[in-house]
Every structure is written in structure tokens, then in C-alpha cells.
Amino acid sequence: MGPGFFPLDEELELEPGGLTSSLAEDLVLLGSWMPFAGTAQLAGHFRKVTVSEATVRRATEKSGEAHVEVQTAQVAVLEQELPQAPEGPAVQQLSVDGAMAPLLHREWAEVKTLAIGTIGVHFILPSYSSPSITLS
């Protein structure tokens, strides 16, 4: 046994630093959604544990770094396995808009629309041209 080893750490699933895996998961979930100080306060209220803001920050940032590593590995696989995308039009336009639409029972929901267009040049007269747009 080395210094700082407690036989129940493994049985209790304590992470290095003294957090159980479920507490660490809760801290990371809240820490990625709200300020670290507020996360520490909520952990005290709901989990009946005392955790510092710094502990929440470390756990959240450690999880974020692990997530970046996973995403980087996935991108490397995609870059090697996927074929090249076909060439598209030289110029395209995207237009996104949103509006509130009434639903049943006096409820409202946001409706989002997307228009994708290809922009080219349309000749009306030999000396005059105007942009032409094909939308979908």
C-alpha cells in the first residue's frame, strides 16, 4: 500500500481527489451549465456534501478535456475514412428565419425556416446582367 491509499476507495468508486463517480458526473453536468460557485452550492444542498468552486472547476475542465480528445479522435477517423465532398456551386446563400406560430390550447412554438440558394449571373441584355438565384 502506498501513501494515501484507502482500501474502500475502489469499492466506493472514488475518483482520485475523493469524488464518487456519480458526484463527479453531477458536478460536471451542472458545472458545464452554470457558474462553478453555484454548482458547489447546489451540490451542498442536494447531495449534502461540501465541494469547493475550485473542485467543480477542475472536474468540469478535466471532463471537457477528455471530451475534446474523444472528438479529435473521431475527426481523425472521419478524415481518413470519408470520401472527398463533391464540388459545389461557386457562390451560395443561406437565409434562416424564425417566427412564433400558434399551436393548440393557446400554446406557441418557434418555427424555423431555412432557404438555400445558388447565386449565378443572368444576362438580360448583352450590356446588362442581374444576379439570378435558385432557391430550394
Image (tube, grey):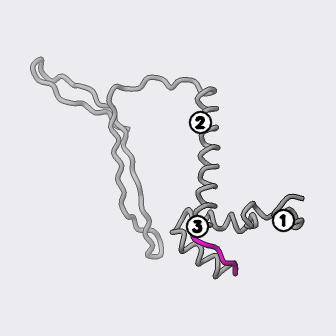
- Left of 36 or right of it: where is 113? left
- Left of 127 or right of it: where is 99? right
Q: Nearer the viewer, residue 51 or 96?
A: 51
Q: Which residue is mark 2?
A: 75
Q: Quadrant of residue 116?
A: top left
State how far apart marks 3 and 1 are (Cα): 22 Å
The reply to whether callout 2 and callout 1 are in contact (CB within 8 Å) is no
Q: Is residue 62 above or below residue 30?
A: above
Q: Which mark, by number, is residue 9?
A: 1
Look at 86% across and 66% down and name the residue there: 6
Q: Secondary structure at mark 1?
A: helix
Q: For label 3, count other residues whose C-alpha is less than 10 Å away and answer few (under 14), some (14-19) or many (20+).
A: few
State how far apart marks 3 and 2 are (Cα): 31 Å
- Left of 9 or right of it: where is 53? left
Look at 59% across and 46% down and name the residue there: 68
Nearer to us of marks 2 and 1 is: 1
What kind of residue is marked 3?
A: Ala
Nearer to us of marks 3 and 2 is: 3
Q: Secondary structure at mark 2?
A: helix
Lower position in the chain sequence, tag 3 or tag 2: 3
Q: For label 1, count other residues whose C-alpha is less than 10 Å away and answer few (under 14), some (14-19) or many (20+).
A: some
